[in-house]
Image (spheres, helix red, strand yellow):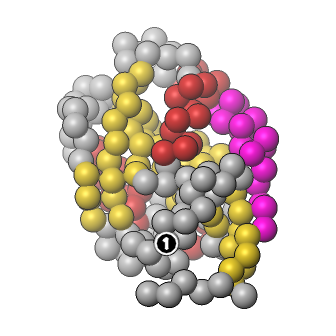
Amino acid sequence: MAQRPYVIDQMISAKAIAARIEALAREIEAEFEGTDKLVVVGLLRGSFVFIADLVRELDLPIEVDFLEASSYGDSTESSREVRILKDLRGAIEARDVLVVEDIVDTGHTMHHVSTLLASRKPRRLKTIALLDKPARRELSFKADWTGFEIPDEFVVGYGIDYAQRNRNLPFIGKVRFT
């Protein structure tokens, strides 16, 4: 499939992202104060940059695991069919768990993943999303923490891609198709 030509306009700077992650880390530390170990679950692939920066800011004992869920493929539109491509390596029963997502759009992925992980009976299950796009919500889902609420724009950067490109941008950019 040929990619449509596009340009990227910066929407959220790297500096703003870093400052917000630092503030979110303090809130998460307060919520999980006293935990023996927080299992931080990154949803691949889009959250890998966010989770790396977030865990470096957390002053808590942590374990990192990953789950890969997909509803996009190389498209700009969600298929609404959530597939688990890679499951967790470890058990989460009776453990404190924080699920880290890059962007909550339709709500299908986070709803599916949260339901799946809740069925595994963690002690506490909380969620964080770097970006929230409420205008596109189809299923009722609100992350416990959100970095930034954004309008209904297709975005890339900071781990988020378009057809596997632009994940390495240090900022969040709006894609404008030309």
Can the viewer see residue 148? no
Can the viewer see residue 95? yes
- Against 42, residue 84 (above or below) is below
| Residue 63: quarter of image | top left
Say left or right for 149 vs 11: left
* Relative depth, front residue between 128 and 153: 153
| Residue 49: quarter of image | top right
Say left or right for 23 vs 76: right
Residue under the image location 40 percent in, 49 percent down: 43
* Relative depth, front residue between 163 and 95: 163
Q: Secondary structure at mark 1?
A: loop
Tell me where residue 4 appears, x and y as whole percent. 60, 86
Residue under the image location 55 percent in, 65 percent down: 165
Residue under the image location 32 percent in, 73 percent down: 81
Residue under the image location 52 percent in, 28 percent down: 55
Q: Quadrant of the C terminus?
A: bottom right
How many numbered callouts?
Answer: 1
- Against 90, residue 148 (above or below) is below
103 within the magenta span:
no
Give the prevailing secondary structure in the magenta stretch: helix
- Against 79, residue 119 (above or below) is above
Identify the residue under disc 1. 163
Tell me where residue 91 appears, x and y as whole percent. 20, 32
Kind of residue at badge 1: Ala
- Against 59, residue 129 (above or below) is below
Q: Label 1 neighbourhood size at 10 Å, few (<14), some (14-19), many (20+)?
A: some
Q: Quadrant of the N terminus?
A: bottom left
* Magenta-drawn segment: 9-24
Tell me where residue 88 appears, x and y as whole percent. 25, 41
* Relative depth, front residue between 153 and 13: 13
